[in-house]
Amino acid sequence: MTGRSSKKPATPASSRIMHPNPRLAFPPLALHVAYISSDRRRTRPAIDSAMRRRQGPTKRLVPTLSPETACPHSYLEEDFIVLEVDCTACQGPSDLSHTKCLSGVMNAMTSGVRPEAIILKRFMHKRYRGQIVDRVSAATAELSALVRTMSASCEPSDKRCRTCPASVHMTVPAMRMMLLADPWTYVSRPEAMHARVRERARSCACPNAHVCVEKALKSSTVPRRGL
């Protein structure tokens, strides 16, 4: 008895049915996979890293607002000097009552003249005059004085003074950061801010610490009663 094979005969190439989508008739593109070591094992971290390099960031990065930021600005001469600050590209609130906005305006004013009006330009412009501009100018004058003191002071030769928190070399930059971190409190309640500075002398064992702290406080231009 002759047995028959269960295998079906091969279909001739001429009679094969092609896929209706012509794009699928071409071979698929090669998939690039990252490998490590000699056994060519696929690694998920390596693949993810390669995909991040190909795709890039998925959303727009928001610029940071740091105390060191100086806002883009220009000066205009009308009947008086006006400081115009361009806030169109900034993510901040565009308001001088906001600490970081005020710090950015102060950093811009340190290299210019004292204006009589400040305009924050965005889709709605904000114009400031009078007492608030005077207080901003006073805070900027304090910032300029601290920067001048930092530029004029030399680094101590003694290693203990270079690392001492009560030294002028360390106290004046700390005062500058306190001013930029909270300008309104600094100029309205300078006695509270100076008390925080004097705490630096109590925290170290140097017998001349209070002398160095008082020397640093002499660079302040804000009156003791505040503004």
Image (cartoon, rainbow, N blue to C red):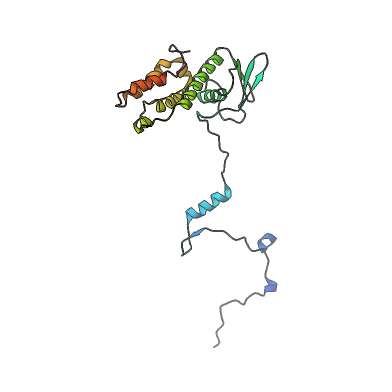
Asked which quadrant contains residue 114, the reply is: top right
Asked which quadrant contains residue 159, the reply is: top left
Looking at the picture, tell me which residue is in the foreground, 68 or 99: 68
| Residue 222 within the magenta-colored segment of the rendering | yes
**Relative to 50, is 112 above or below?**
above
Asked which quadrant contains residue 201, the reply is: top left
**Relative to 171, is 190 above or below?**
above
Residue 31 coordinates in the image, percent (x, y): 57, 59
Q: Residue at x 49, y 21 (%)?
A: 145
- Of all residues, the one furthest to the bottom in this rendering is 1
Residue 91 coordinates in the image, percent (x, y): 57, 30
**Which span of residues is magenta-colored?**
219-223
Q: Residue at x 49, y 25 (%)?
A: 147
Q: Give the main secondary structure, helix, strand or loop, of the magenta stretch.
A: loop
| Residue 87 within the magenta-colored segment of the rendering | no
Quarter of the rendering occupied by the N terminus: bottom right
Q: Is residue 18 visible?
A: yes
Looking at the image, residue 33 sits to the left or right of residue 177; the answer is: right
Q: Is residue 196 visible?
A: no
Residue 73 coordinates in the image, percent (x, y): 61, 25
